[in-house]
Image (spheres, helix red, strand yellow):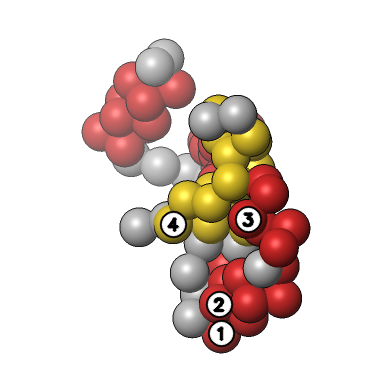
Amino acid sequence: MAKEINALELRRHFGEIMEEVRYKKEPYIVKRNGRPMIVLLDIGVYMASKGAHQQEAFIEEYSTERVKEFLREDKVDKATLARARKFLKR
């Protein structure tokens, strides 16, 4: 669970907060006037989430195209062809 801190406290204790985020992998939600503004994350956590997001986008974007390519190039039995066409209609 992310900890919350206001911007003024973050400014006062930035070094300590940065250490906690980095070494304890503890994210912080930074608020200004009571509203959440940003999240501080460890770089490893950020890169992992960025990579997972890009991979999901790639799979969603190209899966239908890849299935169509597979159906054009490869011989499949009628049952598999029917399931694939049903999947593509979604």
Q: Earlier in the sequence, mark 1 or mark 3?
A: 3
Residue receiving disc 1:
23
Q: Which residue extends farthest left? A: 79
Residue receiving disc 3:
9
Mark 1 lies on a secondary structure that is helix
Q: Earlier in the sequence, mark 4 or mark 1?
A: 4
- Measured along the vertical axis of the image, is residue 58 above or below residue 9? above
Q: Is residue 14 visible?
A: yes
Residue 3 is tagged as 4
Tell me how far mark 1 sits from mark 3, CA to CA: 20 Å
Residue receiving disc 2:
20
Image spot of residue 74 (x, y percent) = 54, 46
Between 78 and 51, the one nearer to me in the picture: 51
Q: Place residue 63 in its image quadrant.
A: top right
Between 58 and 62, the one nearer to me in the picture: 58
Q: Are marks 2 and 4 in contact (CB under 8 Å)?
A: no
Tell me how far mark 2 sits from mark 1, CA to CA: 5 Å
Indicate the amino acid at tag 4.
Lys
